[in-house]
Amino acid sequence: MSQTKPCKLSDTLEQLLARQGGLVQEPFSKTILAQLAQAVKKIADVYTKGENRLNLFSDPALRTAYSSYYLPCNAIKLFPILNELTQRKALPCSDGSLRVLDLGCGPGTLLAGLLDYFLQHRDHAGITLDLTGIDRDSGNCAAARALIEQFLAAAPETPTVEAMRFIQGDIRSLDRLETGANTFDLIMAGNLVNELPEHALGDFADRITALLKPTGILIILDPGTRISFKNLLLFRDEILTRNNMHLIAPCLQEEACPLQDCEQAWCHEKVFWEPPRHVRLIDQRTGFTKHKGVKFSYLVATRDAPAPLNAENLAPQEELWRVVSYNIRNKGEERLYVCNGRERRLLRRLTRINNPKSNDFSSVARGDIITFANTELRSNFLNIGPEAVFKKII
């Protein structure tokens, strides 16, 4: 899930979201920015304090603030995931069509992110999309439909959307969807698993996997906090053991998560991006730091066999690892944490080492998939010494 450069939403989507917030043209109204910032802080308070969110968007001002600020921050999380799936040729659209279900779609967050990604990556231009969104708030369903329609009108180069439907409901509403030939190629759920009680995770896993085609992909996005990670791990166990799903990312193997009993660390990513200008201005007024990067946790799984890593001269799957930390640079050395879904290890390389076979160590980023060999076991790390091989795969 490497980022060679910061992700960015298209100008088309950025402008639509700014206009929804009343920010028609620059310089933006200071009064409107102040109102949006106040509403953004109120939304944050509701989430951080664990208050009832059921009626959060009954206030149009809060829905507007969410769409202006939180929607782009959450939509951008899809980009590095879709980048990796594209590189691995794992997106299930070989026949030119993609049936998509977004659970808890809100005001169109992930559907807009998906369309915007396809708009910017023209190798997906020929895809025909069938979109379904479910949300318990009817206002969110209406807002999602309006946003997608406006985006499609403003960006005719976007892949063709042949059908679009929004259903007011919750997880139980999945029973209203037809199965059989109408199962889905891609199911997405953003910030939903973290809100479910533990006893509901098994039922949720049963319902969504039943709607996924054998070659389909499931993407679960999570806020990326230590507390929410517990539910994500429980859901991970459900889909692996109860539903016979296979992980694609971030885990590269399917054994017990090495962080499941760790209180100090949890698996999360951070996407670096070029945020819309109004997001930066709202950050200035709230003290938030979304402009510096967006943290999240995620799971990508499939019903069928794991998608292969389509690269030449690829190492065996059991020798692949994902970088799960920044490059930790100390005097005379660099360190990285890596994980394969089965174990987490610390690697160390002295900066004086001049070995072309391990030079990738200095340039890899969080999320990259790598392989290494000929390391030296030390007290609490593996040393990338003069004879070691360290190679970036993706």
Image: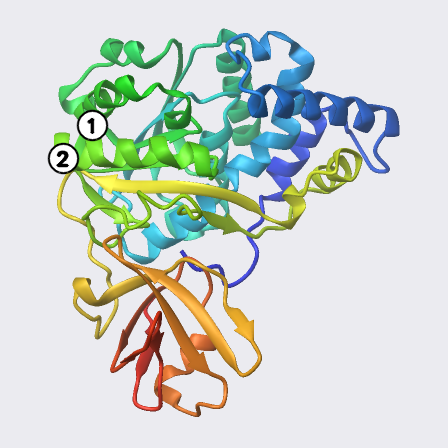
Q: Is 172 on the left-hand or right-hand side of 79?
A: left
Residue 258: percent from the left, percent from the top?
Answer: 28, 50
Residue 344: percent from the left, percent from the top?
Answer: 31, 59
Q: Is residue 243 visible?
A: no
Residue 383: percent from the left, percent from the top?
Answer: 35, 79
Q: Is 175 on the left-hand or right-hand side of 126?
A: left
Indicate which disc residue 329 carries.
none
Q: Which residue is mark 1?
A: 209
Could you tell me which secondary element the residue under label 1 belongs to? helix
Residue 6's place in the image compared with 208, above or below, is below
Q: Quadrant of residue 193?
A: top left
Q: Residues within 10 Å of mark 1 (few under 14, many from 20)?
A: many
Split into 4 quadrants, where in the image is the C terminus? Answer: bottom left
Q: Which residue is mark 2?
A: 241
Residue 155's place in the image compared with 334, above or below, is above
Image point 75% across, 27% down: which residue? Answer: 37
Residue 68's place in the image compared with 352, above or below, is above
Q: Residues within 10 Å of mark 2 (few under 14, many from 20)?
A: few
Q: Amino acid at mark 2?
A: Thr
Q: Quadrant of residue 180?
A: top left
Which of 329/100 is in front? 329
Callout 2 touching callout 1 (CB < 8 Å)? no
Residue 18: percent from the left, percent from the top?
Answer: 70, 31
Which of 195/9 is in front? 195
Could you tell me which secondary element the residue under label 2 belongs to? helix
Q: Amino acid at mark 1?
A: Thr
